[in-house]
Image (spheres, rainbow, N blue to C red):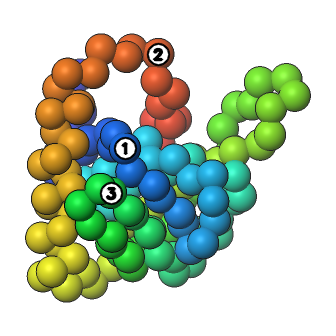
């Protein structure tokens, strides 16, 4: 069965991200509507957060709300991490343009990536 998404999602390359100041945040995928993140701390559903994204061409501070958060299965001795789904909240036109540009810049990375071992979040219903 093919997934139905409301917006195209891409993985990011060469960007630094933090979720409301939390380092160690990794973007699993990103769209103009939201993102799936891997974060070292659990986040409360419905809480307000800011996704801070720094690429070689721009810095974005994107307001969002946490949709869900779940623990990622950890390997023995590895620190706990969490999959956190966020939905962007009331972005300005400039933020949307910047986000779209970031997605376009990373679409080529997504198309050329042959990494099939990437960690994927759980399928939520």
Q: Which residue is mark 2?
A: 117
- Quadrant placement of the N terminus: top left
Earlier along the polypeptide chain: callout 2 or callout 3?
3
Return the disc, 1 or 3, that comes first in the chain's sequence.
1
**Sequence-earlier tag: 2 or 1:** 1
- CA gap, disc 2 and disc 1: 19 Å
Nearest-to-viewer mark from 2 and 3: 3
Secondary structure beneath disc 3? loop
- As drawn, is 82 to the left or to the right of 51? right
Q: Name the residue that disc number 1 marks.
A: 14
Q: Is residue 25 left or right of residue 95?
A: right
The secondary element bearing badge 2 is classed as loop
Q: Secondary structure at mark 1?
A: loop
Q: Residue 54: image x %, image y %?
A: 38, 62
Q: Quadrant of residue 60?
A: bottom left
| Residue located beneath label 3 in the image | 55
Q: Are marks 1 and 3 in contact (CB under 8 Å)?
A: yes
């Amino acid at each position: 069965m093919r997934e139905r998404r409301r917006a195209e999602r891409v993985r990011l390359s060469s960007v630094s991200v933090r979720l409301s100041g939390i380092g160690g945040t990794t973007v699993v995928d990103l769209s103009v509507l939201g993102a799936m993140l891997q974060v070292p701390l659990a986040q409360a559903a419905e809480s307000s957060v800011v996704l801070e994204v720094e690429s070689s061409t721009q810095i974005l501070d994107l307001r969002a709300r946490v949709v869900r958060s779940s623990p990622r299965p950890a390997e023995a001795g590895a620190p706990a991490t969490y999959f956190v789904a966020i939905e962007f909240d009331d972005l300005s036109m400039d933020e949307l343009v910047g986000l779209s540009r970031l997605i376009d810049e990373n679409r080529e990375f997504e198309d050329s990536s042959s990494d099939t071992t990437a960690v994927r979040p759980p399928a939520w219903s």
